[in-house]
Image (spheres, helix red, strand yellow):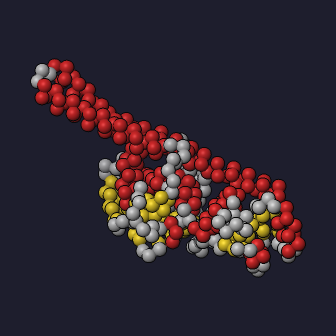
Amino acid sequence: MATTSPSNAHPEIDIEQAPTPRPMRVAIIGAGRSGIALLDVLHQISTIEIIGITDKDPSAPGLRRAQELNVTTYAHVTDLIKIPGVDLVMDVTGDAAMLTALQEQLPPEVDLISGQASRLFWTLVQHESTLQTELLHAEKLAGIGSFAAGIAHDMNNPLQLILGLAENLADEGDLDAVHAQALDIIDAVKRTTAICRDLTSYSRRTSLRQDCLVGINGKLDEALKIARYAVALQDIDIRKLYQPDVAVKGNPDELLHVFVNLITNAVQAMEHHGTLTLETSAEADTTQVRVSDTGCGMAPDVQSRIFEPFFTTKPPGKGTGLGLYNIKNVIHRMNGSIGVDSHIGLGTTFTLTFHDESVAGERSTRS
Ligand SMILES: Nc1ncnc2c1ncn2[C@@H]1O[C@H](COP(=O)(O)OP(=O)(O)OP(=O)(O)O)[C@@H](O)[C@H]1O
Ligand SMILES: [Mg+2]
């Protein structure tokens, strides 16, 4: 199974990693805002290994983030930079004394980025993160187009009902019947409002919600409801193999988006008939979500490119090719990995794996 995963967390087969013999080993000095941004971006890149981070302030927020990402934290700069095999030290403290100390202590084979250079890097990192957000939004907006037919259908039914009831009411003299029909109208309006609510929150530019414990089974069900607007599910058998109480820590809106995309891809691959299987499982420190279809499957050369931005096999105007690219980014930000197992003519399984810190320890507060 081909898998993409953040480099230093899980040494699984990694599509991005294939041509590189040894990852570049980077040490980060400074665990403030810049340190966190560096951690978040660098740990997603399979050719970079973050060997550690340090800050003189033990409560610096980047040290906590490092622990979440399984990056080792050091109390003293000297302990970090003496680790053998460091290729690059990134100093984001902005402290002139730190720069002088590093210049004196670092062996000549270790490169140092500091001062303006590290500020430039920080700007690039912020730019990359803005681009990722923009691409996620671009793909959502493009997707909404394909939802239009489904939405129109689902809105039309209650609207027709409201029209019929309102026409009856115009001639209705019996007060009890008027009350009953008014209640039916209220129900129908609530149904259309629910459709609008689902879709407006789905298409929002950025999530308003924080990371929290997300009940995966409920999210998959919600995703099915939304995917229904984009793809026809009538002739698809849906099998749910849910282990009860499976939850991971993450952003509920982003996870919903991930599941909608995987389900949409699966149904599109089956061309209107087949079996969609949604499976969840949890062990001590690992949670897995599997979305399988009995669709067309993928040839190895397609499989090796599906996580690239804008890669699509759909005709022009039909797909952005951003779905799986965005999914990969979301899952990597959660320090999880995404794997694919596909066979031409038989079908495809996407497996999401969440480890340790993103897996629920306690399963109480749920979104
Ligand atoms: N379940 C699947 N079965 C077979 N092929 C798949 C499956 N999921 C993805 N693919 C392949 O991966 C490609 C990239 O998928 P991705 O979701 O990134 O973009 P897309 O589906 O082409 O476009 P969009 O998501 O904007 O509709 C698809 O064009 C398709 O070739
Ligand atoms: Mg897609």
Work out whether residue 33 or residue 149 is closer to the camera in this orientation and state it. 33
Q: Position of residue 325 (x, y in %)?
A: 57, 55
Q: Residue at x 58, y 73 (%)?
A: 10
Q: Quadrant of residue 289?
A: bottom left
Q: Is residue 306 above or below residue 25?
A: above
**Does any portion of residue 296 appear in the rendered image?**
no
Q: Is residue 178 above or below residue 93?
A: above
Residue 113 in picture, x, y percent from top left: 81, 63
Q: Residue 204, percent across and down?
A: 50, 43
Q: Residue at x 60, y 70 (%)?
A: 67
Please give left or right for residue 184 compared with residue 205 in the image.
Answer: left
Instruction: Look at 74% across and 51% down and name the residue there.
Output: 123
Q: Say which quarter of the image contains residue 60.
A: bottom right
Residue 181 visible in the displayed image: yes
The residue drawn where x is 35% and y is 37% is 193
Q: Residue furthest bottom?
A: 84
Q: Where on the picture, by quarter, is residue 154?
A: top left
Residue 139 location, x and y as percent? 54, 46
Judge from the rendering whether residue 146 lies leftward or rightward of residue 205; answer left or right.
left
Q: Nearer the viewer, residue 213 or 329?
A: 213
Quarter of the picture containing the C terminus is bottom left
